[in-house]
Image: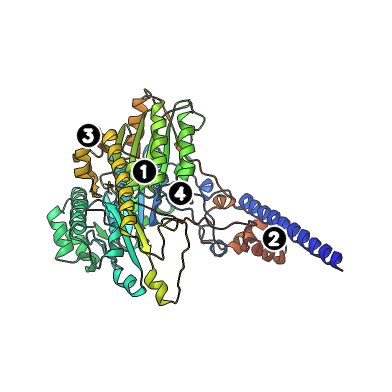
Amino acid sequence: MLKKFFMNALSSFIGAWIALVLFGVVAVLVCIGLFAKLGVSASQGESVAKGSILTIELEGVIAEREIPTDFDYMSLLQGDVKRPQTLTSLVTAIGEGKENKNISALYLKCKGVSASLATLNTLRAAVADFRASGKKVIAYADNYSMGDYYVASAGDKVYINPAGAVELKGIGGTSIFMKGLFDKLGVKFQVVKVGTYKSAVEPYILTEMSAPARAQLDTLYGSLWAQVREELAKSRKKLSSASIDSLVSRDFVFLQPASFDVKAGLVDVAYYERSMDSIIAAVTGKNKDKLNFVSPSAMLGQTDWGQAYGSKKQVAVLYACGEIVDGGGPSTINYEKLVPQIVKLAEDDNVKGMVLRVNSPGGAVFGSEQIGEALDYFMSKGKPLAVSMGDYAASGGYWISCCADRIFANPMTITGSIGIFGLIPEAQGLAEKIGVNPQLVATNPGAAFPSVFYPMTDRQYAAMQSYVEKGYDKFVARVARGRKMPESKVRVIGEGRVWGAAKALEIGLVDELGDLQDAVKWTAGKADMAQSYDVALYPTIESTVWDMMPELTGMKMQDALQRALSGDYTELAVRFARNVLQQKPVQARMPYMSLGFVSR
C-alpha cells in the first residue's frame, strides 16, 4: 500500500512538472506568434519620412536607464503595457531627431511628468539644443505640471487648453517627523553619527526639524528655485525672475485660468488639443492629413549610440543608480555585481576610458568602499575616469565619485553630504506593552549587540560612536585625496551638508557643470580619441521575454490575439491563449529582501 502511494505521488509529481513545462512552451509559442503577427516593436512600423514630427509624451516617471521588467498579466490583458521612459533614451532620441534631415519639428505632449530637477534640466537642455538647430519645438498640455512647464518653456511655442492651468508653485518639500508615534509604540532610536547637518535620522528622534537642517534646505531650495526662475525668464521673453516670483507668490498662478497665463506670458496661445494638428501643419508646411508623427523609439532605431560593445575605441558608460546596498535588485547599486563589472572594464583593452554615471543618495558604507576601491583599480590601469552626476550623488554616492579624474554635475544636481550615521532601533518598551519578555544568555556582553530588545550601554554606545568616526575619517581622507584639498577643508564643507551643484563647483567638490555627453567627450579627449570613438553602456541589459513585448497602442490583448490568429483558429483557441498569458511565468523565485545596517 505504501509503495503504491509513493508511486502515485511520484507519477503526480512528474505529471505536474510535464504540465508546467508544456504550459511554459505554449506561453512562449503564443508570445512568439504574437510578436511575429503584430511586429516585434511598434517602432518598426513607423516610417521616418521627410517632414516627420518627433513626438514625446512627457508623462509619468522618467527613469535614468532601462532595467529588465516583469509585467503584470492583468495589465497585459488590458492593453496597458508600456515601455518605461528613460532619460537616456529620450535625450538620445532628441539628439538623433536634431541631426536627422527627415525630422522637421519636435512636439511635446505634456501630461504630467514625474522627475527630479536634474533629470528635467537635462531633458530641457536637449530640447533647447534641438531648437538651436533651427527646427521648431511646439508644446501642448491640458494642464502643465511644474516639471512639464520647465521642459516645455524651452520650446518656440507653448500652447494650453483654454480650461487648463500652469501649476507653477516654487520648490518645497514636507518631512514627516515620527518620534511621537514611536514613543506611543514604545520604540526608541539610538543614533550615532558624524555631521551637524546629517539630518536623515531626525524624523525618528525629533518632533520637528532642527535649525541646521532647516537652514541647509532653505539654502538648497532657494538656489535651485533661483536657477529655475532664471531659465524660465530667458526662455519666456515677457517674464523676469521677479515677475515669476510675483506670479507664484502673489497671484497663485496655478489657480488662475489659461487666459491669465497667456496675458502674463507664461504660454503663447490657449487652444483645444483638436486644433494642434492644424497648428503643427502650418509650422511644418505640411497638409494636416499627411502629418507623420514618430515616437522616440523610431529615432532610437536610427542610431546605435551606446551599443558599440565590439569597438576597440570604447568609452564605457557605467551606470550606478539607486541606493548602495549589500545585495539588491536592478533599481539599486549592488556592489557585488558592480565591482566585478568595473574590474572587467579595467582589464578590457577595448575600453580606453570610462564615465561613471552616478544617481545615488548613498547607502551602505561597506558597499561604497568596495566600489571606490574597484574604481581606484580602474584608474591604476592608466585609463581616464570621469563622473557624471545625475539627480543625486550624495554621501555614499559622493564617496564613489570623489576620486575620479574629473567630475561633471548637472546644474540641478544635489551632492556632498559627507558624513556617516547609524540608526539602531530599540523596542524594549514595545516588547513590554505586548507581553514579550526576551531572555538573553550569552558568553560575552557583546554577543547580542546591537539588539532590538536592549538599549546600548554607555560603553557600547562609545564603541559605536568610535566606529562611525573612524568611517568618517576614512571618508574625509578619500575626498581629500581625490579632490586634492587639505583634510581640514573637507571637514569644513563636510559635516553631512548637502550642496547644490553651483556651490559644489565653487567649493571644489565638482569640476564642471555639464551632463553625460560632456563627460563622454572629455573622457574621449583624455584617452586621445577626441576625433573618433564609440560609446557602450554598462551593465548590459539582460532582457526577458517581457521586455520584447511591444506597446500595443491601446489594443486589448484579446483583440490582439484575435488579429494574430487571423481567423485560423476557433474562439476557444483564443480564450485558451488568453488564459495562458494570464498565468504566472513558470518560475520558482521570491523577491530579494535586503536586511541590514545602512548608513547614508
Residue 545 image position (x, y, % from top left): 59, 50
Q: What's the residue at 26%, 57% (across, down)?
A: 199
Viewer-side residue, 336 vs 538? 336
Q: Residues within 10 Å of mark 2 (few under 14, many from 20)?
A: few
Q: Given this view, does label 2 or label 3 mark the residue nearer the observer?
A: 3
Q: What residue type is disc 2 on?
A: Gly
Per the image, the residue denoted by label 1 is 358
Q: CA distance from mark 4 to mark 2?
A: 53 Å
Q: Secondary structure at mark 2?
A: loop
Q: What's the residue at 44%, 77% (across, down)?
A: 435
Q: Given this view, does label 2 or label 1 mark the residue nearer the observer?
A: 1
Q: Secondary structure at mark 1?
A: strand
Q: CA distance from mark 2 to mark 1?
A: 51 Å
Q: CA distance from mark 4 to mark 3?
A: 30 Å
Residue 550 image position (x, y, % from top left): 54, 52
Per the image, the residue denoted by label 3 is 485
Q: What's the residue at 40%, 77% (across, down)?
A: 433
Q: Secondary structure at mark 3?
A: loop
In contact (CB < 8 Å): disc 1 and disc 3: no
Per the image, the residue denoted by label 2 is 567
Q: Residues within 10 Å of mark 1 (few under 14, many from 20)?
A: many
Which callout, 4 or 2, points at the residue further toward the start of the chain? 4
Q: Secondary structure at mark 4?
A: loop
Quadrant of residue 381 within the rendered picture: top left
- Residue 321 showing in the rendered view: yes
Per the image, the residue denoted by label 4 is 326
Residue 190's place in the image compared with 395, above or below, is below
